[in-house]
Image (cartoon, rainbow, N blue to C red):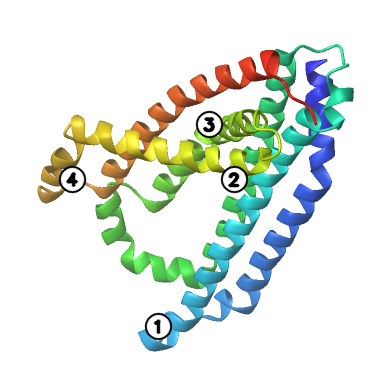
Amino acid sequence: MLRKLVKYDLKYSFKLFLMVHGIYLLICILLRLLVMNQLDFSKPEEVLVPPITLILILEIFLLSAVSLTTSLLIALRFYRNLFSREGYLTWTLPASSSEHLLAKFCSGYLIAAADIAFIAAGILILATGSNVAEAYRQIAPDINDALGTSLSVYATRLFLFSLLFTFTTVIQIYFCIALGQLFQGHRVLFAIAFYFLTGLIVQVLTTVLALASGFFSDQAACLASGFSMGAAMDSIYLMTGALSIVLAAAEYIAAHYIMKRKINLI
């Protein structure tokens, strides 16, 4: 049953997910062919800044739109399938609340991980032209010194870290929706409020933990003595990731309890 639930969720999300990310990759390809490949990095800075700035702004907009669409796709599937009128049919299936939540977690994680892979592919399309590679060779030593490793190695580590910890975002979405559905009449509003609140809590707890452990003072001293920025960022990622895992475990348990004991269908 678990496999069937996951398969059904993925089938439900496939068309919209593929359409959105296909458009994203197509735009990246067009930007590569029409803009990036035409740049001559030997030209003066005032000539290069406008097109590069335009590309960065457009890419940030695209990344935000694609990521938001993916999050909404995961959230809407969870809400509609379990807490709307559709839930009356869903809960008649021979599956427990644990299986429903686990199925949603598996399908949500696969969708979120695929989103990260597509985003990384789009960035690679933009940044792997021969002219970009030639320009990078000139500044590679400075970037390697700052990161403590090559940019490709650091980017790969960041990509794997994102894949590894993206499940915490999926669980956070499910927890906030499950908590929000307890407030009949304002479910969506409370779910959104809880989402931003839990994100704020993670940031606050991370900062408090860093201050209590003397992390910032230690990093400042290390940076002054030539410590790499990459190592400092890795420490921040690991600290945030560890805290997110603890909170994700608590959120998963809480979401399961709500689905088992406090279910409230429309």
Lower sequence index among marks 4 and 1: 1
The reply to whether residue 95 is in sight is yes
Q: Quadrant of residue 90?
A: top right
Q: Nearer the viewer, mark 1 or mark 2?
A: 2
Give the Cα distance between marks 2 and 3.
14 Å
**6 up-or-down from 211: above or below:** above
Task: Say which amino acid is labelled 1.
Answer: Ser
> Which badge, 4 or 3, comes first in the chain's sequence?
3
Q: Are marks 4 and 1 in contact (CB under 8 Å)?
A: no
Are there few (<14), some (14-19), or many (20+) residues within 10 Å of tag 3? many
Decide: is 68 above or below 41. above
Task: Report the residue at 64% width, 55% height from top.
Answer: 66
Mark 1 = which residue? 42
Residue at the image point whose x is 58% and y is 57% from the top: 64
- The numbered dot on residue 227 is 4
Q: Which residue is mark 3?
A: 168
Question: Which residue occupies 89% across, 24% down?
Answer: 89
Residue 7 located left or right of residue 66: right
Instruction: Name which residue lies at 74% across and 24% down.
Output: 264
Of tags 3 and 1, the one toward the viewer is 3
| Disc 4 secondary structure class | loop
- Does residue 106 appear left or right of residue 206 in this picture? right
Image quarter in which the N terminus is found: top right
Which numbered disc, 1 or 2, marks the residue that appears first in the sequence? 1
Q: Is residue 44 visible?
A: no
